[in-house]
Amino acid sequence: MTENGLKEHAYTEQTYSQQNNGAGFSGGPRLLADIGATHARFTLETSHGVFEAVKVFKCDEYAGIIDLLKAYLDQHQAKRIHHAAFALANPIDGDYVRMTNRAWEFSIEDVRREFGLYTLLIVNDFTALAMSLPGLQPDDLMQVGGGKSVAKSVIGVLGPGTGLGVSGLIPTSDGFVTLGSEGGHVNFAPCDEREYAILQFAWKEWPHVSTERLISGPGLELIYRALADRNQQTVKPLGAQEIMHGALQEADPLCLESIDCFCGMLGSFSANLAVTLGAFGGIYIGGGIVPLMGERFHQSAFRSRFEAKGRFSSYLAQIPTYVITTHNPAFYGVSAILSEHLRGRSGDSSLMDRIQAIQAELTPAERRVATLVLENPRTVLNEAIVEIARLADVSQPTVIRFCRSMGFTGLADFKLKFASSLTGTIPVRHSQVRRSDSTHDLSAKVIDNTVSAILSFRDQMEVHAIDQAIALLRKANKVEFYAMGNSRAVALDGQHKFFRFRIPTAIYGDAHLFSMAAELLNPGDVVIVVSNSGKLPELLKAVDSALHAGADVIAIAPHQSPLAKKATVCLAVNHTEDNATFLSMISRILQLLLIDILTVGLSVDAAHDEGSKQKELSRFSHLLISHLDS
């Protein structure tokens, strides 16, 4: 996960198990915020689940997020804050944020630097709300109909406020992953004649009416005006809070009809979300409107409309619906997200640093485990508890006690987070670089896209083909590289590496030359052909000549390409790039990786081949390969 924003987040029970331990953060308090279009709420989290100095600001009174942050932090100048996480009522896609419901725009990285933060995470507000759900207690919720939630099932979350937020929690083997969604912008679907009349009224203002236009604070105001028009009443337009007051405190008939209609629409939309997600974990409703209705929401048409799904009524009757009644639930969500991001860290230190810092507080036996972890981290990650205990000269329960002293539930939990802190977690995704992207954003996207392709390539790699290729190269009398265009850089890299193995090696990047060279090959020679498309006629003709001469051909090309089908062995690179239009970038990196894999494989193969001749071994043994131990 990057520090510039998160679309999806893993959640584990450990995040909330620490809420009440009373221990402060070694890195100082953490700044949390829930920034909507109307109000912004800030707090300092001094220890897990302990929120202090809660302050609410009106966004209209500030020119932008930097002014807003200054207004809060000026009140806490004595506290040094290193880490922060904000929930924002806006989609988050990269470093630059343009708010939908407010004329604010900013760079996340610029804000981080402005306030000297080590970490700044900004996430969608309903992603944060979804992340808060597993940590909520029964007293934080009001159930409205339905049965019991099913453990480890999908959970849906939505909430009308200034807009209509939608998200979900998808169960995984070790917790939940949040679902990034802009589901509030689906088309509004009326369910009766009254709602159709309201839709017609809304069409006078907008050609496209999303659900958010009606199931939101501004939507409640529109419903009020539309019902007045339908009832042929002349009324003064009211704000959402005034309509709520008129219904709940004064029993005004039009205000009551407005919120009843609003609740019915919300029931239908919630049911659509439930059947779409299969949300047997329940539907949770937050936002700034429904929690204020209290018992009136219980008495509304919400639940009857939720279950009014024809053949699927019994399906929906099993799914519980809840109203989130606790104050500032987004704080719990951004706290969980920030904690998960910093897992393996204490304050601003890595997990390795934390182990070093805490050693004096451990028992002598636990210190031996800590020493093993610091000196042999990969061994600890790869070995079972029996071997870890033997290497540290402690009992197995001591290993578990060490993990719990570090704040983890056990060895498996420790290993998971320790691996993350050593290597980082990288989302497998592809993001298109936009012309409007900042240098920071485009750099991150290029790196993420390349890493994503490498991870996908790793998972799909055909190890058997690599073994075959290494075996051919191990016995090769000479190796020739054939490539054209951008692929010549890869062939040149291979020629440089294999020549240093004392293998006679040549490279040909001209169609006429490699056609002539192929005719001069003999059995025992190997040709490595590098091609982005695997379709160039000149290369295919040269391969035919090489095979006819008795040589073997290793193709670094797409699987199922004409070149792959002709070759003795194909090392498939299936990353799709339009090489006729775009300069090849990612596929070149994958081709270079294959050259490196073959190089390291040759070295390892030589070291393990005890039956080979000393002369053959000498071809490989003089080189030091950075991937190998000494």
Image: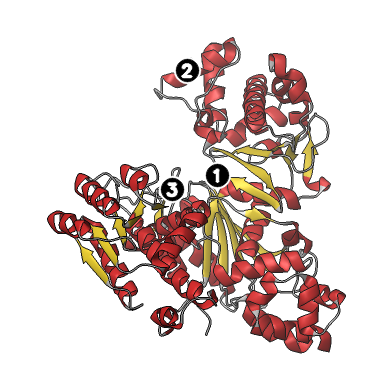
Q: Tell me the CA gap for discs 1 and 2.
A: 31 Å
Q: Which residue is mark 3?
A: 99
The reply to whether dot 2 and dot 3 touch (C-beta < 8 Å) is: no
Is 472 drawn above or below residue 541 in the view shown?
A: below
Q: Which numbered tag is attached to residue 231?
A: none
Q: Which residue is mark 2?
A: 201
Disc 1 marks which amino acid? Answer: Gly
Seen in the image, is 140 located left or right of residue 243? right
- Label 1 vs label 2, nearer the camera: 1
Q: Nearer the viewer, residue 411 or 158?
A: 411
Label 2 secondary element: helix
Residue 235 image offset from top left, x and y in percent: 53, 21
Which quadrant of the view contains residue 614?
A: bottom left
Q: Tell me the CA gap for discs 3 and 1.
A: 17 Å
The reply to whether dot 1 and dot 2 touch (C-beta < 8 Å) is: no
Packing grade of label 1 (10 A; few <14, some 14-19, many >=20) is many
Is 246 drawn above or below residue 522 in the view shown?
A: above
Going from N to C along the chain, the mark reached first, 2 or 3, is 3
Q: Residue furthest left?
A: 512
Is 222 drawn above or below residue 139 in the view shown?
A: above
Label 3 secondary element: loop
Q: Which residue is mark 1?
A: 180
Q: Nearer the viewer, residue 91 or 381?
A: 381
Disc 3 marks which amino acid? Answer: Met
Label 1 secondary element: loop
Q: Nearer the viewer, residue 580 or 108?
A: 580
Residue 232 image offset from top left, x and y in percent: 53, 11
User: Is residue 575 visible from the viewing direction of this image?
Assistant: yes
- Label 3 vs label 1, nearer the camera: 1
Disc 2 marks which amino acid? Answer: Phe
Seen in the image, is 85 located left or right of residue 529? right
Seen in the image, is 477 located left or right of residue 268? left
